[in-house]
Image (spheres, rainbow, N blue to C red):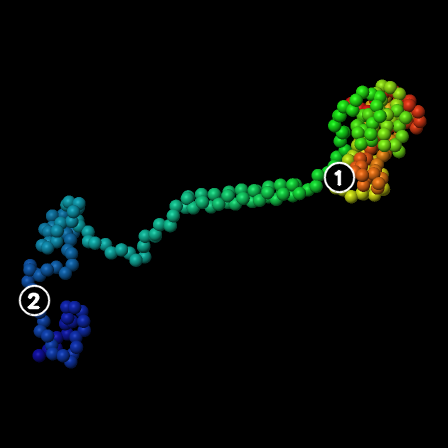
Amino acid sequence: MSEDKTPPRDGTPRDDGEERVPPAPDVPPETAPPTQPVYPSQPGYPPVPGFPDQPGHGDQPGYGAQQPDPAYQEQPAPHGDPVKRQRWVIGGIVIGVLILIGVVIWVLLNLLGTRPEAVVATPSPTVSLGPLPRDTEAKDFQVGDCFADFDPNTSKARAVACDTEHSAQLGAIHTYAQDDSFPGTNALREKGREVCGTVKLDRAAADKYVLLQQNVYPSTTSWDRGDRRVDCFIVVESGNTITEDLLER
């Protein structure tokens, strides 16, 4: 008897050490179930028993199921909307810039708020001290006041109308803060020169006279009593020879 070399139907190799299993009897072709789909290659081919007609193809040839190509895989859609992500990024940048601007403004406001205010020489407010002429305390002198027989070493002076004879006119004032310490005589003298530099004269009137600048500033004793004024007077060397307002209006 010849040896059967036909492999089993399931594809497993035979074991030569075991008893041979007789082959399965042949099945007539018309009754054997098909092992794979058979599709007609031409129109009018008779349908194969056991396989329903493919829907939607009509008289066109049928096509077997296609296996997906492993080389082509559908790429997953990116997570989230890229336009929305871009808007979020731009919004975050804008918010960051606004916060930075707010911090800078806050710092600047704090720096400006803690900066000590400079004391500027400004005219004293106009206060009605009574009709002229009158004797006036030095603390009540006002810019523009004219004085007859002016003596800078006294605490009072006689204020008169500027269109009458006088020897001095107050041109400018600088006032130190009450909590300032005594700056020293030299600093006060220099401050007097600085204050006189701010006086603006009426050149038509001033050119008629030989004018001088007279600085009056506190001593250590008057400073301790609260005197904080540095005054600049426009004066003549002697006599009440000025008969008009010398300041530019």
Quadrant for residue 189, please give it: top right
- Which residue is found at the position 80% from the left and 37% from the top? 227
The type of residue carrying mark 1 is Gln
Q: Where is residue 173? Give x, y as percent.
A: 79, 32
Mark sitting earlier along the chain (1/2) = 2
In the rendered image, the vertical position of residue 213 relative to residue 162, given as above or below: below
- Which residue is found at the position 15% from the left and 53% from the top? 39
Q: Where is residue 142? Give x, y as percent.
A: 79, 28
Residue holding disc 1: 178
Q: How many marks?
A: 2
Residue holding disc 2: 26
Q: Quadrant of the C terminus?
A: top right
Instruction: Let me know if residue 240 appears in the view.
Output: yes
Q: Where is residue 55? Give x, y as percent.
A: 16, 47
- Which residue is found at the position 83% from the left and 38% from the top? 222
Q: Nearer the viewer, residue 60 or 238?
A: 238
Q: Secondary structure at mark 2?
A: loop
Q: Where is residue 149? Give x, y as percent.
A: 90, 26
Using the image, tell me which numbered label, if any, was put on residue 148. none
